[in-house]
Image (spheres, rainbow, N blue to C red):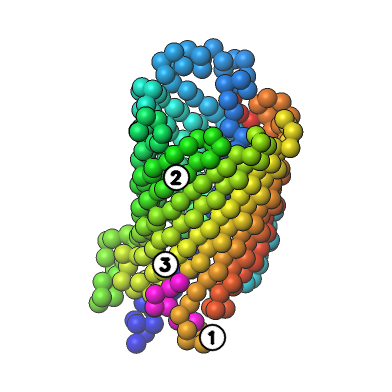
Amino acid sequence: MKAKKALILAVVLSFVAIANCMAQVTAGEIMQDIKNFIWSTDEKVAKFVRPVKEGLKEKRLDVDFFAGMSQGFDNNVNLDPERRKDGFFEVTLGADLGYAYSDDLRLMSDSMITELLYYNANESNFLDLSNKTTIELDIWDDAAALGGSYAFNTAFFPVDKDASYTAHKIGTYLKTGNYDPFYHKLKYDFSYKNYHKYRTRRHSGIKSETEVGIVNNSVGHEGGWLLFDMVLLKNLTEFGRSSSNYYFMHYYDYWFFKLKPSIVLFATDELSLTSSFQYTKKDYDDRTSSEDDEHVYDDNYRLNFGLIYRITKSCSLSGNYSYRDNRSNEPLQKYAGSVWTLGVYYTF
């Protein structure tokens, strides 16, 4: 009986650590959105970079670099009912490489390194390395584009080593239009995330050498509309399933639905305002609530507001507010929290 209780406890603790790990990267997602928005164009590069970039362009290569640092405050670091508060400092470096093999075929690679340091909640500190490589082909007389991508992401938690993981993601898509003034994209993604320190257990309870992994399959539609060259409207709709290779964690397998509308207002040449709302619905297969024995469901809401002010052609300031609220019929999964960030970013 003691062995059985120990096994159940190990499984629960494994899931809690994995859930916390997923929560801790929220601030990094904000930085990724900012980087994607203010990435420089050729006209905005520093003079010492221009000759190098022009030389590369003759070889059909285009390279951009991004550096940013931000100061923030998170009033619910672990996204749980305890609401632990702490400030953090974040540094990000990025590089974007594009290669035009021909007028219709191109290769794109996007790499980022992000380090996030909390002042007191050191177990949430992490270093994240990521790369996404995409190949895209124009089809139907340039009326549409067919693409495929592979993304690699590894996160290292120096204090809470059990939360460290590596993720792989393969995707394919078909898109039409290029904000002229509309665009549409249909996509499919498959991802696999494995946790370095956790091993699965056999039905007998004996630990194996296989790392605990989580598989995600999803299909989605993304659309955008550019109005009067001043307002950009976008929406992402996604549906999929998350499951584990660990028999004792099938309890946490679920279906999900995601809806994410967003808007960007180009108020002036220097000032842009952004806002987005994300709703995610999760329905668990077998997990029942400790409160009423019904199947567990989560309704997750995220609201973001931001502004970006371009000081020079290459330097920008950004402020961002993000609110997260998870409503569930399982009391342990109910939480709410906010993140504020202020940062400076340089593109060249």
Residue at (58% x, 32% y) in the render: 39
Q: Could you tell which of marks 3 and 2 lies nearer the N-terminus? A: 2
Residue at (68% x, 25% y) in the render: 313
How many discs mark residues in the rendered view?
Answer: 3
Residue at (71% x, 26% y) in the render: 312
Q: Nearer the viewer, residue 316 or 83?
A: 316
In the figure, 132 relative to 10: above or below? Answer: above
Label 2, secondary structure: give it. strand
Label 1, secondary structure: give it. loop
Q: As shown in the figure, which amino acid type bears the numbered disc 3? A: Trp
Label 3, secondary structure: give it. strand
Q: Which residue is mark 3?
A: 255
Image quadrant containing the C terminus:
top right
Q: Given this view, does label 1 or label 2 mark the residue nearer the observer? A: 2
Answer with left or right where residue 200 lies relative to residue 218. Answer: left
Q: Are marks 3 and 2 in contact (CB under 8 Å)?
A: no
Q: Is disc 1 surrounded by few (<14), some (14 to 19) or many (20+) residues within 10 Å?
A: few
Residue 40, image x, y percentages? 59, 28
Q: Which residue is mark 1?
A: 291
Residue range of the region highlighted in magenta in the rendering? 283-289
The Cα atoms of the two marked residues, 1 and 2, are separated by: 41 Å
Image quadrant containing the N terminus:
bottom left
The Cα atoms of the two marked residues, 3 and 2, are separated by: 22 Å
